[in-house]
Amino acid sequence: MAFQILLNVFLAALWMFLQVSFSARTFIIGYLLGMLLMLGMRRFFTERFYLHRVWAVIYLFLLFLKELVKANLDVLKLVLSPKLKMRPGIFALETELKTDWEVTLLSNLITLTPGTLVIDVSDDNKTLYIHAIDIGDVAEAVDSIKNSFEKAIMEVSRR
């Protein structure tokens, strides 16, 4: 991915030299033209085209914002209800993530979402122990995390 970004910047600089114009506008035009050129020649690269990963990062960020708003509303409903109908609990989440930074990112996203907190991570980084302020069905909570955050993190990190 880094090679593709550097190549795109080099093509933009080359475009600036060919145009004999050293402005930001010329650089942006050269960058976009270089991106189109690289998109057309993407089959010669060993990795995916780098914009796939950029879009995956943007999607992960937007997914986190959506889950953040949804969790805030759920916690607000719990706090403002006249009777406390909370069902707190701790459950284990078996993760398919392999690297330390993937597990750390998943743990941080879960912890930053109101109502959930990662208590511990197993020694082999395969199991996260999560406390939830209100948990109805454990399988539903696990599926929700696996189908949202974990899937998006794998899209960002895998080739």
Image (cartoon, rainbow, N blue to C red):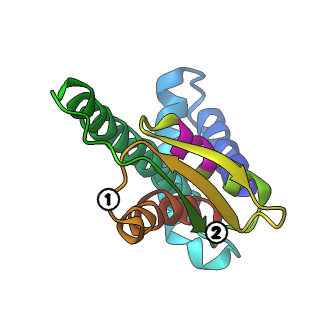
* Closest to the observer, 8 or 30: 8
Identify which residue, 51 or 153, lies in the foreground.
153
| Coordinates of residue 8 in the picture (x, y in percent) | 63, 49
Please give the name of the residue rendered at 47% of the width and 58% of the height, measured from the top-left corner.
36
Query: Between 159 and 16, which is closer to the camera in this rendering?
Result: 159
In this picture, is 151 found above or below 44? Answer: above
Above-or-below relation of 66 to 78:
below
Local crowd size for mark 2, using a 10 Å CA cut-off: few (<14), some (14–19), many (≥20): few
Residue span colored magenta: 107-111
Where is mark 1, residue-wise? 136
Q: Residue furthest left?
A: 82
Residue sitting at 74 percent across and 51 percent down? 101
Quarter of the rendering containing residue 9: top right
Predominant SS along the magenta part: helix
For disc 2, the marked residue is: 158
Q: Amino acid at mark 1?
A: Gly
Locate residue 64: give its quadrant. top left
Q: Amino acid at mark 2?
A: Arg
Position of residue 81 measured from the top left corner of the image (x, y, whole percent): 17, 29
Q: Nearer the viewer, residue 70 or 37?
A: 70
In this rendering, the answer to whether 59 lies above or below 18 is below
